[in-house]
Image (cartoon, rainbow, N blue to C red):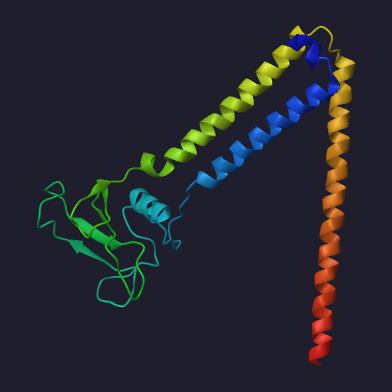
Amino acid sequence: MKWSDQIANQKVRQRLRYLYLIVLLLLWIATIGSDVNVREGKAYTDFDHVALYIIEYNDVPDNYVTAYMLRTPYRYDEFQNNEELLPLGFTYTEVYINATADDYGAERFVFSDDTLFYTMNHYASFTEITKSNILGGYYLFRGLFYAFLVGGVFLIGLMLTLSKEVTVDELKRDIKLDYNLLKENYILVKDKIKETHKSWKHKRESKKSVEK
């Protein structure tokens, strides 16, 4: 069977639309999940956010404190670069990352005005961290999302245009069918949320009455 004959089938068109939307949704979730944003003055402790904060503002987040407070896992101080493993001629600051109050660990960020380095073995070796390292996944998924969005719409539109058996009225029925299906699912989810809320409320009231 030719693709033009298959696309004339409403169920086939519906499967194509749903498959397209599912892939688009997954790419959108991956894009949002891989994004890293920092704001000056906010507190951060994880690797990506602290690294990006240092790159953006050449400073550590406000929750980091100076080295004289030895019990904090977030301390920072000047790094001497005695082994000369980093480029010379710069003043470096070291920052603890993934540390706890009981164990500072071997991970550090070391940064200057222009560069940020990471060591996972207590200064034995360093890896330079750039904005592209941190946001590489986000840029990739964002590119795939927009490419799939534009390319998918173009491809589906082209297929429908070339298929003379699919009329405008059939496309209108497709849209109406999708709308009604979304509306039904929305009502079902809404009713389920209401039922869950009522159940939780009833349990809380029952617990309060028992405590009294």
Question: Could you say which is closer to the camera, residue 175 or residue 8?
Answer: 8
Observer able to see residue 204: yes
Residue 68 location, quadrant: bottom left
Query: Where is the C terminus found, in terms of image quarters?
Result: bottom right
Q: Which residue shows up at 13% across the image and 56% down it?
A: 81
Query: Residue 182 placed where, x, y %?
Result: 83, 39
Question: Could you say which is closer to the camera, residue 70 or residue 11?
Answer: 11
Query: Residue 104 placed where, x, y %?
Result: 30, 69
Q: Which residue shows up at 16% across the image and 49% down it?
A: 86
Left or right: 119, with 205 as reference point: left
Observer able to see residue 115: no
Query: Residue 72 placed where, x, y %?
Result: 33, 74
Q: Is residue 209 above or below residue 29?
A: below
Q: Is residue 50 above or below residue 152?
A: below
Q: Which residue shows up at 22% across the image and 60% down it?
A: 122
Q: Which residue shows up at 83% across the image and 80% down it?
A: 205
Question: Could you say which is closer to the camera, residue 168 or residue 23?
Answer: 23
Query: Residue 83 placed where, x, y %?
Result: 10, 55
Left or right: 68, with 2 as reference point: left
Q: How many marks?
A: 0
